[in-house]
Structure formats: structure tokens, C-alpha cells
Amino acid sequence: MANSAQALKRARQAEIHRQRNASQRSNMRTAIKKVIAAIAAGDRDKAKQAYDAAVPVIDSSAGKGLIHANKAARHKSRLNQHIRSL
């Protein structure tokens, strides 16, 4: 356990950041799963709408440092590739 006031404060901040990051990561994964579900169903219009909703969420996660920019680009590219193949 932290002994100094500074270490106690950092521990509190780390817990707050961990919870916020977990929530944002969950939202991003949910958005991606909605696109994948629409692709699996073969519904191009629904997949396109879900993709359009997921892109800002993915970009936001990358902008906040939650995921790397290359990972965000990879997710968007692969999802778009699957939609185009429908």
C-alpha cells in the first residue's frame, strides 16, 4: 500500500483512469461487434450504418491513447473490407 500522500493520490488517480479506460474500451469493442454482427447477417446497409457509427468511437479511442493509431486504422480497414465484399 502507498505510504506517502503523493503515492496515495496517484493510486486514487490510477483507479479512476483504469475505470474510465475500461468503459471506453468496452464501448469501442461493442461498436466493433455491432459491425461484425451485421456483416455476419449479410445486411450491407445495416453494416454500413454500424460502421459509420463505429468509426468515430474507434478514432476517439486512438486519440485518447487507449489504443494505438495503427490499431485503429487496422480495425477500420478490415471492417470496411468486409463490408465492401458483401
Image (tube, grey):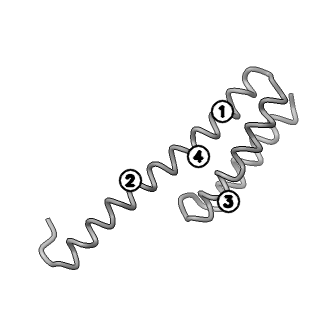
The first of marks 4 and 3 along the sequence is 4
Mark 3 — residue? 70
As shown in the figure, which amino acid type bears the numbered disc 3? Asn
Q: Would you say the residues marked 4 and 3 are in contact, meaning their CB atoms lie under 8 Å apart?
A: no
Q: Nearer the viewer, mark 1 or mark 3?
A: 1
As shown in the figure, which amino acid type bears the numbered disc 4? Met
Q: Is residue 20 left or right of residue 33?
A: left
Mark 4 — residue? 28
Which quadrant of the structure image shows residue 42? top right
Q: Is residue 10 above or below residue 69?
A: below
State the residue lying farthest toward the top: 41
Quadrant of the image containing the C terminus:
top right
Q: Nearer the viewer, mark 2 or mark 3?
A: 2
Q: For marks 2 and 3, give the CA distance.
A: 24 Å
Res 80 label: none
Mark 2 — residue? 19
Structural crowding at the residue carrying mark 3, measured as other residues with C-alpha within 10 Å and reported as few (<14), some (14–19) or many (≥20) = few
The first of marks 2 and 3 along the sequence is 2
Report x, y in % for residue 65. 55, 64
Instruction: Identify the element where label 4 is drawn.
Output: helix
Instruction: Identify the element where label 2 is drawn.
Output: helix
The first of marks 1 and 2 along the sequence is 2
Mark 1 — residue? 34
